[in-house]
């Protein structure tokens, strides 16, 4: 006796068979497979985005978030005039560009290292991935203590090396005040973002690096190509599509992130390290001007849209080539 | 008061006899306050939830949770208390109002006037409380009532003193036996201490709560204000400019650049680590230091705020405990029991003050007689300060404590100026030389006027007469 007969379950017949055949049609199956993702995008991306646009053109406050009054572009005009907004826009672009630059260089180097076998590689990989596994807030707190104005171990080392402190090369203070200075503060945010984003970018780049046949490198070496020639003529062109994907992912995650700045510098001194997402939060939620907060968040949209389209087109072209 | 009293001792603190002046009075739960009457027991199924920030003195939360549970048992109400981070309070209330559901009561730490359109008027319990408990502290009244809307949007049950704190040993060695008395002392003495010992004055110039409060105390004590009684912007004045010039001089002589990077915990940490000669903060850091036995506590002295050039002393409260009830709360039993809870809490506030280790001051001073009376808690700290009268300076705190928006009400514009760090940024920009004091004040004035103009257009600012 077969298993099907024993359990009383036979091949589908009648209506069930027709439903099965209908579901097997490529068009139906495609919609069924894509449906959940489409619904997800509509519910969690499309709707909030439209809501943000509607809020930014209203006079909504946190006490009355209704959309009953249309004010056109007034909120955009109001926020764009402030120094804080200008600094936040500038800093958002600096932090994103700085992080992308560092991440791309380091991810390429790391993938070159990880593509080879070496003793302790698994342990190294595990430690390497840790920053990506940590919550952003925990990352920020770790770095906040690391760069603390009073208790920083980095300062301690610099004092021991006679670089800081009375008679030191970098001045009489015993602290660098990493988070209390405009450019050091921005650099601190970039370094922290790089530390957090490097594992993801490395995994993406490593996948591409592993797909390059080793014979191409061997042939190049036999032909007398040096390290840099191999890097620029073989490795980087082959990595290009995935590097673009890494840029896209890293850029989008960094430019929309506010927790790091919120915890590390709170946008200070003054507004000198302010970024758009945190400024939108301060203005919209803490300050009560929900509509202006929404307007601030939307300022990045055109940049992100153009950058994303260009990056994806470049990635497709590279793949086709 | 016409209702019947029901006395109930709750918790260890509540078991003290009425004669024992070192302990809070026995707890009572009347069934009426002024014109408001409440049942002894609510119908089955009545429930309230309270979201409040995790207290800086942990023993308060332990007491409050137990008090709320037993209050619920007595009144047949299921009471749920959620403690969240101080910084998450505004976003939690904002999300709840937008969603149309959430906690019955939210305890705010600063005037929540920008939420007023989403909040239920609490005029009745404020009137009942004033009838029952007497005069409310100005710092509470001005941060829970908005004249432009003629509405009590919150019920402020307590507040926190924000004193000056100094290292008595360092200041004594510098020739100031009683510590700094004026801002001029802070500048000259602070500079001398920094020069002699390397220990700076530690007042923040960062976009955070303590820096905002120091900046306001400085401006007020120099005679400047952000707005007048009717909500007209007054920040651009010679007095404010003098305060901004002062901060530049103070930074150049007695501070270090670390103050630009500070968060609300930084000055506490610096002080406890022995790397600060003067800070402005509430007493919670001192209680923490007592708990962990830091030697620095024995050289710690407190004082009311410093005197400005004209002899004025004004300090903000450090925190306000203001309950609000969003409009989405519509169940009559839930509303009534929540109001009952708020009034009972104020009735029994001596327990709140005691269990917060004198951190919570009552909105109605009459409710905690042990606090102020001669030989009371401030004269003889039940939590072990040495000397025992270390906290006695707070007896006059109501006289020198004001509020954001002083001398006017804490309207939404005042809140936005505070939350978007306009004032601390003005001070930081002047101190680190990014802008001249004049330019920093001019830029801040423009921002303040824009913010006030926006909220005025919406009808949130003014005396309510027009």
Image: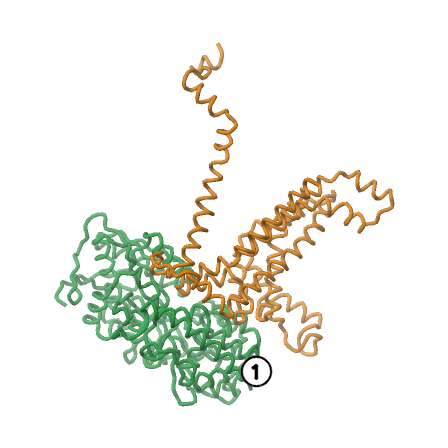
Chain colours: A orange, B green
Q: Quadrant of residue B325?
A: bottom left
Q: Residue at x 43, y 48 (%)?
A: A47
Total numbered labels placed on residues in the image: 1
Q: Is residue B167 visible?
A: yes
Q: Position of residue A105 (x, y in %)?
A: 70, 54
Q: Residue at x 44, y 72 (%)?
A: B286
Q: Residues within 10 Å of mark 1 (few under 14, many from 20)?
A: some
Q: Which residue is mark 1?
A: B252
Q: Position of residue A20 (x, y in %)?
A: 46, 22
Does A198 sit above or below residue B350? above
Q: Residue at x 35, y 81 (%)?
A: B400
Identify the chain of the residue marked 1, using the numbered disc in the image. B
Q: Position of residue B3 (x, y in %)?
A: 13, 63
Specify the quadrant that holds the C terminus of chain A: top right
Left/right of residue A127 with respect to residue B155 in the rendered view: right
Left/right of residue B57 with respect to residue B172 in the rendered view: left
Q: Position of residue B306 (x, y in %)?
A: 42, 84
* Residue at the limit of the structure toward the top, as seen here: A1
Q: Is residue B369 visible?
A: no
* Residue at the limit of the structure toward the front, as seen here: A72
Q: SS of the residue at dot 1? A: helix
Q: Nearer the viewer, residue A3 or B444?
A: B444
Q: Nearer the viewer, residue B429 or A143?
A: B429
Q: Nearer the viewer, residue B81 or B290?
A: B81
Does B368 sit above or below residue B335? below
């Amino acid at each position: 006796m077969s298993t099907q007969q024993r359990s009383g379950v036979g091949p589908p017949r009648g209506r069930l068979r027709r439903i099965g055949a209908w579901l097997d049609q490529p068009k139906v199956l495609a919609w069924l497979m894509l449906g959940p993702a489409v619904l997800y995008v509509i519910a969690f991306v499309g709707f909030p985005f439209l809501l943000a646009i509607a809020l930014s053109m209203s006079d909504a406050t946190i006490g009355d978030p209704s959309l009953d009054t249309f004010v056109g572009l007034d909120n955009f005009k109001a926020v764009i005039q402030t120094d804080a907004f200008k600094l936040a826009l500038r800093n958002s672009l600096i932090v994103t560009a700085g992080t992308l630059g560092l991440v791309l260089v380091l991810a390429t180097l790391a993938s070159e290292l990880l593509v080879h076998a070496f003793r302790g590689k698994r342990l190294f990989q595990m430690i390497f991935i840790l920053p990506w596994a940590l919550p952003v807030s925990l990352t920020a707190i770790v770095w906040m203590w690391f760069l603390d104005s009073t208790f920083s171990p980095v300062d301690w080392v610099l004092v021991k090396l006679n670089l800081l402190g009375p008679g030191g090369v970098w001045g009489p203070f015993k602290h660098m005040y990493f988070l209390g200075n405009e450019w050091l503060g921005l650099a601190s945010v970039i370094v922290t973002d790089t530390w957090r984003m490097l594992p993801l970018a490395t995994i993406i780049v490593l996948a591409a690096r592993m797909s390059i046949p080793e014979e191409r490198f061997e042939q190049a070496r036999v032909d007398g190509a040096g390290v840099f020639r191999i890097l620029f003529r073989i490795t980087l062109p082959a990595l290009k599509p995935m590097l673009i994907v890494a840029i896209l992912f890293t850029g989008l995650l960094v430019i929309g992130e506010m927790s790091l700045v919120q915890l590390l510098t709170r946008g200070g001194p003054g507004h000198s390290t302010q970024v758009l997402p945190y400024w939108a939060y301060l203005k919209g939620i803490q300050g009560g001007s929900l509509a202006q907060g929404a307007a601030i968040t939307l300022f990045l949209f055109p940049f992100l849209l153009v950058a994303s389209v260009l990056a994806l087109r470049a990635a497709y072209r590279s793949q086709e080539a | 008061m016409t209702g019947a009293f029901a006395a109930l001792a709750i918790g260890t603190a509540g078991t003290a006899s009425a004669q024992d002046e070192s302990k809070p009075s026995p707890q009572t739960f009347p069934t009426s306050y002024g014109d408001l009457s409440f049942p002894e027991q609510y119908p089955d199924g009545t429930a309230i939830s309270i979201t409040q920030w995790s207290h800086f003195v942990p023993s308060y939360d332990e007491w409050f949770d137990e008090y709320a549970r037993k209050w619920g048992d007595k009144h047949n109400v299921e009471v749920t208390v959620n403690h969240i981070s101080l910084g998450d309070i505004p976003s939690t209330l904002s999300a709840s109002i937008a969603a149309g559901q959430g906690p019955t009561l939210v305890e705010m730490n600063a005037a929540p006037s920008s939420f007023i359109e989403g909040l239920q008027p609490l005029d009745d319990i404020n009137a009942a409380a004033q009838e029952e408990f007497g005069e409310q502290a100005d710092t509470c009244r001005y941060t829970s009532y908005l004249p432009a809307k003629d509405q009590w949007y919150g019920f402020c049950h307590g507040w926190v003193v924000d004193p000056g704190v100094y290292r008595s040993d360092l200041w004594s060695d510098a020739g100031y036996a009683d510590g700094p008395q004026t801002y001029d002392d802070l500048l000259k003495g602070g500079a001398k201490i920094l020069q002699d010992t390397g220990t700076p004055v530690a007042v923040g110039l960062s976009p955070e709560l303590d820096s905002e409060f120091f900046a306001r105390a400085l401006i007020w004590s120099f005679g400047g204000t952000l707005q007048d009684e009717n909500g007209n912007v007054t920040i651009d004045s010679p007095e404010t400019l003098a305060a901004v010039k002062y901060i530049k001089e103070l930074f150049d002589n007695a501070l270090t650049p670390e103050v630009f990077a500070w968060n609300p915990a930084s000055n506490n940490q610096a002080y406890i680590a022995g790397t600060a000669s003067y800070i402005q903060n509430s007493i919670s850091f001192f209680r923490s230091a007592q708990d962990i036995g830091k030697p620095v506590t024995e050289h710690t002295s407190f004082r009311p705020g410093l005197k400005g050039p004209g002899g004025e002393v004004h300090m903000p409260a450090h925190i306000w405990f203001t309950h609000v009830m969003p409009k989405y709360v519509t169940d009559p039993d839930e509303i009534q029991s929540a109001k009952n809870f708020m009034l009972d809490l104020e009735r029994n506030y001596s327990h709140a003050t005691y269990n917060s280790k004198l951190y919570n001051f009552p909105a109605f001073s009459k409710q905690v007689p042990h606090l102020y009376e001669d030989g009371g808690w401030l004269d003889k700290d039940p939590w072990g300060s040495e000397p025992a009268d270390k906290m006695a300076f707070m007896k006059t705190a109501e006289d020198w404590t004001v509020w954001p928006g002083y001398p006017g009400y804490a309207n939404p514009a005042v809140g936005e100026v505070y939350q978007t760090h306009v004032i601390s940024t003005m001070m930081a920009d002047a101190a680190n030389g990014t802008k001249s004091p004049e330019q920093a004040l001019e830029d801040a004035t423009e921002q303040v006027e824009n913010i006030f103009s926006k909220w005025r257009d919406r009808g949130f600012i003014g005396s309510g007469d027009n």
